[in-house]
Structures are given as C-alpha cells and as structure tokens.
Image (cartoon, coloured by chain):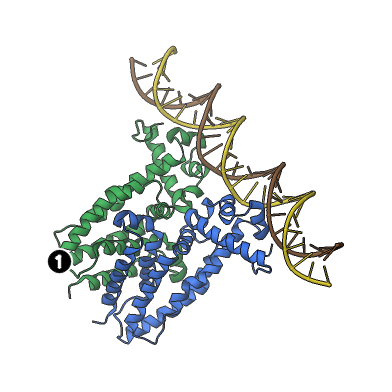
Chain colours: A green, B blue, C brown, D yellow
Amino acid sequence: MVAAVPRTRIQEKNIAAILDAALDVFSQAGFRGATLDQIARAAGLSKPNLLYYFANKKAIHVALLSGLLDSWLDPLRALDGAGDPVDEIVGYALRKLDMARDLPRESRLFANEILQGAPRILDMIEGPLRTLVDEKAALIAGWASAGRIARVDPHHLIFSIWATTQHYADFDVQVRGILAPTGDAHFKEAGQFLEHLYRRALTPA
Amino acid sequence: MVAAVPRTRIQEKNIAAILDAALDVFSQAGFRGATLDQIARAAGLSKPNLLYYFANKKAIHVALLSGLLDSWLDPLRALDGAGDPVDEIVGYALRKLDMARDLPRESRLFANEILQGAPRILDMIEGPLRTLVDEKAALIAGWASAGRIARVDPHHLIFSIWATTQHYADFDVQVRGILAPTGDAHFKEAGQFLEHLYRRALTPA
DNA sequence: CGTGATCCTGACCGTTTGGTCAAACTCTTT
DNA sequence: AAAGAGTTTGACCAAACGGTCAGGATCACG
C-alpha cells in the first residue's frame, strides 16, 4: 500500500519484481500501451496483488520515472572542471553511449514519456533537470570563453550528445534494420564516430 | 471502403481530414494510446463514418506511415555527388532540421513507431530505407577515401544527423522545458550549432 | 425526376482494461 | 499457540474501446 519505502522482505522482493517488470513493459509499449495484466504476469504476481503494492497504474509509472531520472543524469553530474575540457565532453558522450547500450529500457522509458508530452515529469524537467543542465552549460561556456574549446552553444551541445547516444537505444530497431549487426558490435563503431565528431568539433582552432 | 485512392470529392475531403486528424492523435499518443473516437472527433466525423473510409484503426496508421516515409527521406535522396561534400552533408543536416521544425508531427509519428519496435514498417526499414542509406553511405565513403571529407563511418554519420535533428521534434517538450524559448527561436541556434558541428568534424585535416 | 450509388448515423455488441472487495492464507511476534 | 499484521486470490464491476449493422439521408447522373 505504501510502496515508497519497503518495510518487509516480501515487500522488498515484490516491489523490485514489479518495477523491473514494469520497466520491461512500459519501455516496450509506453504508458498507454502497457496493461496491468502484462506487468503482473511479468512480475509473477496476480493483478490484485500487484495493486496491493501500488495504488494504480500511474503510481507504478511515476515510481519508475522518478527513481530513474537521478541515475540517468549521473554522467552529466560527473562532468567536471578538473580534466581537459575536450576529454571531459568526449568522455561524457561515451559514457552516455555506454548507458544506451547497457540500459536501453530506461532510455526508451524516458523517450516514450517525453514523446507523449512528459505529463508526469514535466515539473522535474523544468526544475532539477533544467538547473543541472544550466549549471553544466555555464561550465562549458566558461571553457569556450577561455579558449579551451571551440565556441559552441553549450545547451545545443548537450542536446546533441543526448540525441546521438540515446538514438542507439531508442531507435535500436532502425539501427539494427540498417546495419544488421551481430549483437553489440556496432556500439564500438558508434563510439569511435562520436569520439571523432566531438573531438574535432570542440578542439580549439 | 477503398480509402487508398479517393474517387469522389467527398472521399477526398474526408480522407484528408481523417489522415490529418490521425496524424495529430497518433503522433501525440502513439498507436495504442490513440482512440478512434479521438480521431473521429478531430476529423469532424462520427466513428462509424470514419470506419466507412478505413477498415480499422490499423489501416489508418498504415496509410499514414507508408504515405509519409517517402517524403521523410526526400532530403537524404537529395544528397548528391555534385557540390562540395562538406556543404552537401551540412546542407542535409540543416534541411532535416527544417523538417523537424515544420513537420514535428510526422517526426513523432515515426519515433513512436520505431520505439514500439516498428511492427508496421520493419519491412520498409530493412528494405527501401536500408537500400537508400547504404547507397548514400557509399557516396560518403567515396568522399572520405578521396580525402574530400574526414574519415568517418558514413552510417553513423547519417544516424547522428537523424538523431540531432529529429531530437528537436521528438523531444520538443524537453528542449522547451530547458531553454524556455519563445516560439521557434531556438531552431536558429540549433542550426548554427549543427553547422559548426558537422563542418568542423568533416572538413579534411 | 427517378434511381442507384455513395455517404452517414444511432443503437448496439463483445472484449479489454483499470480497479475493487471480501475472504482466505501466511508470516511474525509474543 | 494465539493473535494480529501482512499478503494473496477469485470473483466481480464500470468504463472505454474497436468494431458492426440496419436503415436513412444525400448525391450524381441518365
């Protein structure tokens, strides 16, 4: 009933199973396309039992989204003023690419949510996300005015990194339909391309 | 009943209204999230009347997708061996960005479809789309071996152009949540950034 | 003007879906 | 072992949904 903070072993186990199952189903079908029966079956529970742990479908979705946004932004938080600016940004892109490879469900969950107009996380976008992005954009802008990287719009640089990396998770079907790769082989090529792209574009003239 | 090729003025008008309404609804809610009532209301028709023109929900979706894929790929088809290679590719990216600005519904319709695993256009992806992409990738590869652009993986270059441009349509809500732009102002900045990005990355060393 | 083709509608139907509920089962604690 | 908290289930419900159908309205055309 509470579902926020598990209090018993059974709750802990079942809530984890539900969230994992829901991540599967929501990321494949979107919120509207997912059904409670699907999630319950994937979690190995009956539908009423699932609704014993979460008040309703929306609550599961919200729990997933808010729990995930944090970890999703970790690589951006790690962008630091310490190292070489170009290496920092290239490294960020490559870390995001690793996430697209290793956590495609999470990427697709967010993509679905944003596509539908982000009804459940718009406040997070306009709040914490925007704050973090503005902060890192200022860092990048500083590098640019110091001549340590090329003069580029920091916000659009960040957008382009998000777009190019998440593309490999969100549009996986298309990428595979065109490249017909075996397994994850194409992620290595993608990494080399992105390294070239951002290193070349950012290295000061 | 036929719906493929309109034969009367009324058919022409109503089918156009249905497809336009369906583009609205499908692009906002995805296939599963869209309802026939929504589409019918948006088209100014009753549901049975809508189903007089299209056999079922799927038929509307398919009609939209197959009718759109062609025009969607026009900019890529226009990529030609004639002009300066860097200008050609930069121009392609900017044309795609214009499309993201002017035809966001179409972009989101495809994004939704691909996200759900492209159940209705997978054959088109693995067929005509793949053929076209391979053809243009070969053209770009030729430029690279001739030293007219930097050595980059052509397929991943194309993917990155798709990703960076369609991002502004598909993730519009997020972009606006962070930039809080007035109208389309940010598309100009995005164009300048992308021009820099691809020109720098592709100009031979 | 009449007639056949086309167009449109209200009423209806079966299924799916999110969600409820009372009752039963199980686990922990004393 | 008793009791109470915590867990699970089958049966059920109302709403939403995709789709059907018989009949009526309207249009194009000889």
Q: Chain of mark 1?
A: A
Displayed quadrant of residue B172? bottom left
> SS class of the residue under badge 1?
helix
Question: Could you tell me the amino acid type at mark 1?
Answer: Ser
Residue at numbered disc 1: A145
Q: Position of residue B109 (x, y in %)?
A: 48, 61
Residue B78 visible in image:
yes
Q: Position of residue B35 (x, y in %)?
A: 56, 51
Q: Quadrant of the N terminus of chain B?
A: bottom right
Query: In the image, is B29 to the left or to the right of B11?
Result: left
| Image location (x, y in percent) of residue B164 | 35, 66
Give the residue at x 39% y 68%: B162
Using the image as rendered, state which of residue D7 and residue A37 is in the foreground.
Answer: A37
Identify which residue, B91 or A148, lies in the foreground.
B91
Mark 1 Cα-neighbour bin, 10 Å: few <14, some 14–19, many ≥20: few
- Answer whether residue A84 is visible to the viewer in this image: no
In the image, residue B194 sits, relative to residue A53, either above or below, namely below
Residue D14 in which image quadrant? top right
